[in-house]
């Protein structure tokens, strides 16, 4: 089984994915880290030097490569991954179990407000504009996120609680 975690940046995909993979005794991959390995550039550098369109094409290529693997794994996607090209359709394959980690705007703002330097899309956002920015993105991405096999709420839960909930869904 290929378990794919999707959701907005800051919802916990990477932390939960790593924890869940250890629990399931399978490999864990973070799509952004894999893109950085392939391109030999950070995500921030790719956005600055090549632009978002180039990044989204690379993202699609690397995602396809992973979904073609014959091994079981947990993969965390970037926040926008399901929304570009036909990525949300790629997640509909029979051997893919996708989970939307749904977090409230307030949770996301609290997690992201101090990470703006590491997030290319969040530069120049203060707390009020960040909340508006997230709300607009969540509205725009809602359709794509809800194409996931299951939705798990990430608010006010520990990493372990969320991983246990996902493990129950997989059974």
Image: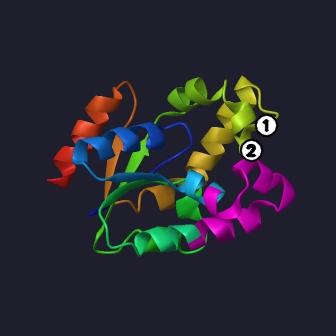
Mark 1 and mark 2 in contact (Cβ < 8 Å)?
A: yes
| Helix, strand or loop under label 1 | loop
The residue closer to the viewer here, 102 or 49, is 49
- The x and y percentages for residue 104 are 48, 34
x 70%, y 36%: residue: 118
Please name the residue that numbered disc 2 is placed on.
Answer: 120
- Crowding at mark 1 (Cα within 10 Å: few <14, some 14-19, many 20+): few
Q: Residue furthest right?
A: 49
x 41%, y 76%: residue: 68
Q: In the rendered view, does 109 fall on the left or right side of 7?
A: right
- Crowding at mark 2 (Cα within 10 Å: few <14, some 14-19, many 20+): some
Q: Above or below — where is 116 with respect to 89?
A: above
x 24%, y 41%: residue: 23
- The x and y percentages for residue 97 are 30, 61
In the rendering, which numbered label is found on residue 123?
1
In the rendering, which numbered label is found on residue 68?
none
- Residue segment shown in magenta: 37-61
- The x and y percentages for residue 40 are 71, 58
């Amino acid at each position: 089984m290929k378990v794919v975690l999707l959701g907005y940046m800051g919802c916990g995909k990477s932390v939960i994915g790593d924890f869940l993979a250890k629990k399931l005794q399978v490999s864990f991959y973070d799509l952004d880290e894999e893109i950085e390995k392939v391109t030999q550039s950070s995500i921030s550098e790719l956005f600055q030097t090549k632009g978002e369109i180039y990044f989204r094409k690379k993202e699609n290529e690397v995602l396809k490569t992973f979904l073609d693997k014959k091994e079981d794994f947990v993969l965390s996607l970037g926040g926008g991954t399901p929304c570009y090209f036909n990525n949300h359709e790629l997640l509909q394959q029979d051997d893919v179990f996708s989970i939307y980690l749904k977090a409230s705007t307030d949770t996301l703002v609290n997690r992201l407000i101090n990470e703006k330097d590491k997030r290319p899309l969040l530069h120049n956002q203060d707390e009020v504009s960040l909340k508006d920015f997230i709300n607009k993105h969540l509205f725009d991405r809602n359709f794509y996120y809800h194409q996931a096999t299951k939705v798990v709420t990430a608010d006010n839960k520990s990493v372990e609680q969320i991983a246990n909930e996902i493990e129950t869904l997989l059974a």
